[in-house]
Amino acid sequence: MRKYTLLLLSLFFTFHISVEAQSGKGKLVGKIVDKSTASVGELIGAIIIVEGTSFGTTTDVEGNYNLELPVGNYNVFIKYTGYKTEQAPIIIQANEITHLDMAIEEEKVDLNEVVITSKIEKSSSLSLIQAKRNAAVISDGISSDIIRKTPDRNVSDVLKRVTGASIQEGKFAIIRGMNDRYNAGYLDNTLLPSTEADRKAFSFDVVPAALIDNVQIIKAGSPELSGDFGGGIIRINTKAVPEAYTQSISIGAHYTSTGTFKNFKEFSSYPGEQFNILNSKRSLPNLEEGQLKTTTSFPSLLEKQRLGETSKLFNHDWENKEINAPLNPRFSYVLGFPIALKNNNKLGFLLALNYSDTRKVQSGEISSYDGSGQVSDFNDQLYQRNTSEGAIFNINFVGAKSQLSFRNLFNSNLDRNTIVRTGKANITDGIDVNNVANFVNFNRLTNSILSFKQIFGTSVTALNLNASVNYSNICRKTPDYRIASYTKSQDDSQFNLSTGDFFNSSTGRYYSELLEDVVGSSLELSKGFNDRFKSNVKIGGFYQYRNRDFNGRSFVYGGVLNDEITLNPAIDLSGKHIGADQLYLVEKTSDDIAYYHGQSNVSAAFLSVDQRWMSKLRSSYGFRYEMVDIQVDNQKFNTEIAQILKSSLLPSINLTYNLNERVNLRAAYFASVNRPEFRELAPFAFYVFDKNADIKGNKNLKIATLHNIDLRWEFYPSGVQLISLGVFQKYIQNPVEFSIDIAQPFTTFTYQNEKSAKISGLEFEMRKNLNFLGRHKVFNQFAVLCNFTLVKSSLQFNEGSKALANRSLQGQSPYIVNVGLQYESEDKKWSANVMMNRTGRRIAYVGVDPKYGQTRQDIFEAPRSVLDLQVSRSFKKFSLKITCSDLFHEQQLYYQDTNNNKHFDEVGGDRTLFKYSTAWQSTLSLSYNF
């Protein structure tokens, strides 16, 4: 910690002095683009002139400009040969950045100068809405200025604000009713791999909201984007290098209603783990092959001696400390600055740091059933401590016709969990349980991308070269997942320590590690043509190589505990009770399925054409050709488990008709695919304690193919306002779903293909101020945000399927609603926001028709509403913010709808399988801008 403090202090003194020396000046920054092709038409060498002064500059390779000016009011002219000159009034304030982006229009009549006056809008919401308005494809998004007005901590929180998006299990994105596996993620133009050990999904809670600039969800295909998606492509753009010096620090205190200032059980914490450095005491000892294995269920005396001595190598610290949970700390820091070089070149740097430490408590109820009724009934108390740290370090060089950038993101999360479980393992037989599970989940994501851009020429017909290489590393560890299981039958007078052959039903320990390296590259050439269609043609290629290794090892306790049972694992399972004549560990790892190695190669080539027809109609069309080779094998025995080798030709077309200056009509068609993930193909079962179930892969999964159609109407009343209405339809062949494996006696979830599915939906979005209610200026200070999505899906099942007829696609909600009201005072000092999100019920796990067994029918996740509130006050150098999230704190409920009436009946027969409490939360934070 001392190192970090010294570093921050040195950075502060170095750069704070430099900014103070610049007082009395401000900066004008912006981007100039061709209005007709705004998404691809950056204008290089456009001239920016400040009227009545000698100040001026030109735009760089990306159409950006940066001009330092004394404090004052000015008129600015933007000129470019063959285009209408635009004029805008600006105000420059000391040590502040004024933004002026312009989309200028080609002069069609003659070369006489025409001047158009524009008003400046200073808002990143404006930039995002204008990008959406001018984009060739259908998209939705949210910008940093909206994110700052919410209590959102990470990207998963942010995504639920976007039209058509919802979040499952706090971190997985569902877009347009399609499960997480149907969505692709990009981080700074890098295609993201799956972060999960047991599903095809990116865990969006690993990216802190404080480090992102904006999030976009692209809902229609385009040749230059991955073809492996169905719901949407989620593009996360981290903070860019700023145009002027910036330095800020924020500290906060976070409160949870069920955890803070309350009794909290904390599993053993070791030095360094508050900064997510795993301690070696959690590591699996160095064991020789077969050192903890036995030939029979009843080991010989000699085997017991070997098992007892080897078991002593393990860490037997089971201590759970009880503390009074303190307030949860929050910290973030941002430092960015540009350096002016010769010939109008510039070099920029950005450093952003983020840290949080959160304790929370949840209570839960877990039940299971058979044909005669309820079998088990458990009550859980979950204590979780999560530490998260993230960092961004970006370097950017911009020249007259070239750009070189190096962007880096690092994030790690460490979850330390304790679950105390009591209740009935078998109600009929009267078997009571008293279990404790202690486990740690460690996740680390590292992503680096080096990109290069070169422009050959100076007009819109210039040849553009874009190239990039990237590297990502994912590490996910569960070091020493421990379960202490005690049971008591109705004939017993006391609890007994459960020992046996299976990790999911006895006292045991489990270790797993997932390591994945991803290397990618892309190359794109684009050229504009000054023809009647204002064509822009792109060709390019993409390559990605992934290499994943996973191994998991399970151990169970054998032998007997000679001392009296205390129901405290720290005593009962301590080192003094380990030995040949007491307790010992036996390895139960199944060698054929506990290890897998995954490798994939994806190559793609694409051609894209963007054209204007009759000034109002724009078409963007082309195709993408992808080849994929996915292999999964057992890394220990070098045996193949599954392989998929397939190529796909994916056409797409996007049409936009500008009905007038404010209205767009859009239509799109694209083909796409959805490929199985390594884990989904590996037939390895892993026990999940909080679900009391196994999760298993399926090596026979097929690639799903999709055909997608979109229609949308968009209305833009003014810069930051919009209203849109759209419909979409998707046809899926071989959809992949998460289902109950009815062939297994113990509750097991797996993956399966169905024959086909069809999804139809409607989307509406509105962002509007309240000036239509009256002329008073106060109405301009309020804005309403609203978006909702209605979705309906149907499936055709494989021959012999036992699925319930007329059910929806797994993960699909019939509706998603977001409503918000925002206030900002005229002087920009006060702001307040209230937002509500609600998602309809959805199938979490696919089951069977009740006539084939009521205990294995579909499991639904019940709808819940989330209400968030924020109030902030800005001062000259600092700001104060109070946020409250999940004020309703409705429970998370998973159930079986036994009477099939499409809602949960607490009284009347519906079966509750999992039920978890939630907490309302509040954060007070103080930010200071140097």
Image: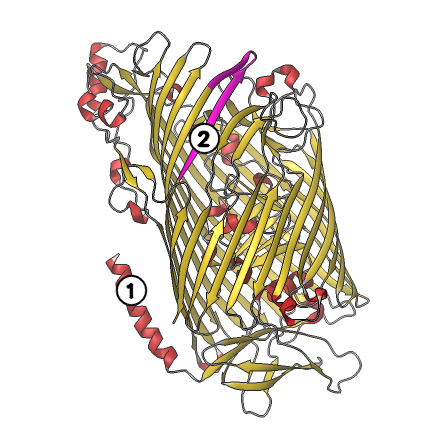
Residue situated furthest right in the rendering: 614
Q: Between 234 and 733, which is closer to the camera in this rendering?
A: 234
Instruction: Categorize mark 1 by other alpha carbons within 10 Å: few (<14), some (14-19), many (20+).
Output: few
Q: Position of residue 115 (x, y in %)?
A: 71, 84
Alpha carbons under labels 2 and 1: distance apart:
44 Å
The answer to whether residue 498 is left or right of residue 706 is left
The answer to whether residue 43 is left or right of residue 890 is right
The secondary structure making up most of the magenta span is: strand
Q: Residue at x 80, y 81 (%)?
A: 109
Instruction: Categorize mark 2 by other alpha carbons within 10 Å: few (<14), some (14-19), many (20+).
Output: many
Q: Residue at x 37, y 23 (%)?
A: 589
What's drawn in magenta, residue-wise?
Answer: 361-376
Q: Which mark is residue 7?
A: 1
Q: Residue at x 57, y 52 (%)?
A: 835
Secondary structure of the residue carrying tag 2 is strand
Give the quadrant of residue 856: top right
Q: Which residue is mark 2?
A: 364
Q: Position of residue 276 (x, y in %)?
A: 33, 47
Q: Position of residue 536 (x, y in %)?
A: 69, 64
- Marks 2, 1: nearer the viewer: 2
Q: Position of residue 680 (x, y in %)?
A: 52, 32
Q: Which mark is residue 25?
A: none
